[in-house]
């Protein structure tokens, strides 16, 4: 083959025509001598057809036609040499003084139409010594529309949208923010990422593109590096790009700068960390102080009698409600950050323990054992329901607690003789905030919100009703459904 190549390239070399220039063309190109033998089959043509130059250079008999169309047939370069018509493989042929331009039929090599250009080659004496033919994709309305869509997408996302070929060269590059960085997108196409990025990052991007092309998988990475005087972070996602025959021909990707997003997230995390720290310190100090106050008041109450003892009990209950608020805030933080695990819990024991905490309040409950799926946090459901009744019914309120089993569920009811809940407010009393982020209309604070949160995590539900059906002014009834063990 080497002797054959030397033999056919002799006339071309003597003509002093720089044949080597065709080897470096970005688009596929071939050169024929006057006998129709292949003299040049450049790298782009190798990639386009999958046929190495070593297998076809020196070959005649329309071997190049078979590589393009699947059969030995003349191509546009042969039309130049033979002064013949383009034949059935081409349409829209146009002639000018420089050669031929034609669109081809769909080729097996690419699975799509191509645009071919052919021109004669002359030596220094003006004698024709061969013909050159180059090919490229046919530009159509759909491709131009797709190109425009990519531009719009890149602009809307404020992201880089690019395509890299197998050699790691940009064949497409859009970025709405390029001008602000002093970058001309047009100068990027045809170059490697080294013209845009630091060497290490450029090699990394080319490596990702090659992995995508070879493996056909999507690759997503977040890269942080020094670029144009600043530390920047980019989220890069690269996909394989297929031709109409389903072969992977390139890698296409989107790179979105997330520097500000990361800085904002870090600032938010730091603010949350400080808020949690301050809340812990504040809650711990107030909790300890309130517990001391409740203990002192209880000691004082035991030394008093009659109306004075009752007054001391009211003060203690008020202090304990403050303690309950602190515990609710801490509990809400726990519920938002930890998964609740369920276990069998004796509902009767939980209720009885909370009733004893509210000595001096008229709470009526008939003890009866009921096992439900919950956890020790269930005590906060009972505590908050009793506290809510006292808050809106006063120290003289009467509270009735009942439990009824029905099938696989247990319904807990806490009813009181307080001010009741108007019908239009009932749907919102368990919601801490509205959809607009404002306190929900009818909300009764954290207590009932925590009741709802826990009930949901236990696989149950909660709703508000009237103590006397149809008469909200005669007191409220909060009902909680739990799953029976």
Image: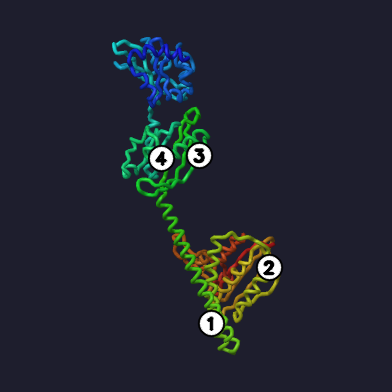
**Viewer-proximal residue, 373 or 154?**
154
Q: Which mark is residue 346?
A: 2
| Mark 4–mark 3 distance (CA, rounded to whole Å) | 23 Å
Which numbered disc flags the more N-terminal residue, 4 or 3?
A: 4
| Mark 1–mark 4 distance (CA, rounded to whole Å) | 73 Å
| Mark 4–mark 2 distance (CA, rounded to whole Å) | 67 Å
- Disc 3 is placed on an element classified as loop
Instruction: Tally the numbered discs.
Output: 4
The answer to whether residue 402 is above or below residue 4 is: below
- Disc 1 is placed on an element classified as helix
Residue marked by disc 3 = 218
Marks 4,3: beta carbons within 8 A: no
- Disc 2 is placed on an element classified as strand
Q: Is residue 173 left or right of residue 56?
A: left
For label 4, the crowd category at 10 Å Cα-Cα, with few meaning under 14, some 14 to 19 and many 20 or more, is few
Marks 4,2: beta carbons within 8 A: no
Residue marked by disc 4 = 199
* Coordinates of residue 17 in the picture (x, y in percent): 33, 16
Q: Is residue 327 left or right of residue 18?
A: right
| Mark 1–mark 3 distance (CA, rounded to whole Å) | 66 Å
* Coordinates of residue 474 in the picture (x, y in percent): 55, 75
Residue marked by disc 1 = 315
The answer to whether residue 37 is above or below residue 42 is: above
Q: Is residue 479 left or right of residue 240?
A: right
At x 34% / y 44%, what residue is drawn? 177
Q: Give the position of the C terminus as an image quadrant.
A: bottom right
């Amino acid at each position: 083959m080497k002797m054959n190549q030397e033999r056919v390239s002799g006339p071309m070399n003597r003509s002093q025509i720089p044949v080597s220039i065709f080897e470096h063309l970005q688009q596929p190109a071939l050169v024929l001598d006057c006998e129709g033998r292949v003299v040049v089959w450049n790298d782009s043509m190798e990639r386009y057809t999958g046929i190495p130059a070593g297998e076809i250079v020196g070959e005649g008999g329309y071997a190049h036609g078979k590589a393009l169309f699947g059969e030995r047939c003349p191509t546009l370069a042969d039309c130049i040499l033979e002064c013949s018509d383009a034949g059935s493989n081409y349409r829209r042929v146009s002639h000018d003084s420089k050669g031929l331009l034609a669109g081809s039929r769909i080729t097996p090599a690419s699975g799509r139409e191509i645009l071919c250009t052919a021109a004669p080659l002359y030596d220094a004496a003006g004698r024709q010594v061969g013909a050159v033919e180059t090919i490229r994709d046919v530009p159509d309305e759909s491709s131009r529309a797709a190109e425009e869509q990519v531009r719009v997408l890149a602009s809307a996302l404020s992201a880089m949208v690019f395509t890299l070929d197998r050699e790691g060269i940009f064949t497409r590059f859009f970025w709405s923010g390029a001008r602000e960085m002093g970058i001309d997108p047009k100068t990027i196409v045809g170059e490697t990422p080294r013209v845009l990025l630091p060497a290490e990052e450029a090699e990394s991007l080319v490596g990702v593109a090659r992995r995508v092309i070879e493996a056909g998988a999507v690759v997503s990475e977040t890269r942080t590096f020094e670029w144009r005087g600043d530390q920047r972070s980019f989220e890069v996602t690269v996909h394989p790009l297929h031709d109409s025959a389903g072969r992977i021909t390139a890698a296409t990707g989107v790179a979105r700068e997330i520097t500000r997003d990361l800085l904002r997230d870090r600032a938010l995390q730091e603010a949350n960390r400080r808020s949690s720290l301050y809340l812990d310190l504040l809650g711990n100090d107030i909790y300890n102080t309130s517990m001391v106050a409740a203990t002192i008041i209880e000691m004082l109450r035991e030394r008093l009698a009659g109306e004075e003892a009752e007054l001391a009990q009211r003060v203690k209950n008020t202090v304990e409600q403050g303690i309950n608020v602190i515990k609710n805030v801490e509990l809400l933080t726990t519920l938002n950050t930890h998964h609740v695990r369920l276990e069998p819990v004796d509902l009767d024991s939980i209720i009885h323990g909370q009733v004893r905490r509210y000595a001096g309040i008229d709470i009526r409950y008939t003890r009866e054992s009921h096992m439900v799926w919950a956890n020790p946090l269930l005590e906060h459901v009972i505590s908050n329901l009793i506290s809510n009744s006292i808050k809106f019914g006063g120290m003289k309120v009467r509270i009735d607690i009942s439990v009824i089993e029905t099938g696989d569920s247990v319904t807990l009811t806490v009813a009181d003789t307080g001010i009741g809940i108007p019908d239009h407010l009932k749907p919102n009393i368990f919601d801490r905030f509205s959809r607009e982020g404002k306190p929900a209309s009818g909300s009764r604070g954290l207590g009932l919100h925590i009741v709802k949160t826990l009930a949901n995590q236990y696989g149950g539900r909660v709703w508000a009703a009237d103590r006397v059906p149809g008469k909200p002014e005669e007191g409220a009834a909060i009902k909680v459904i739990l799953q029976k063990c």
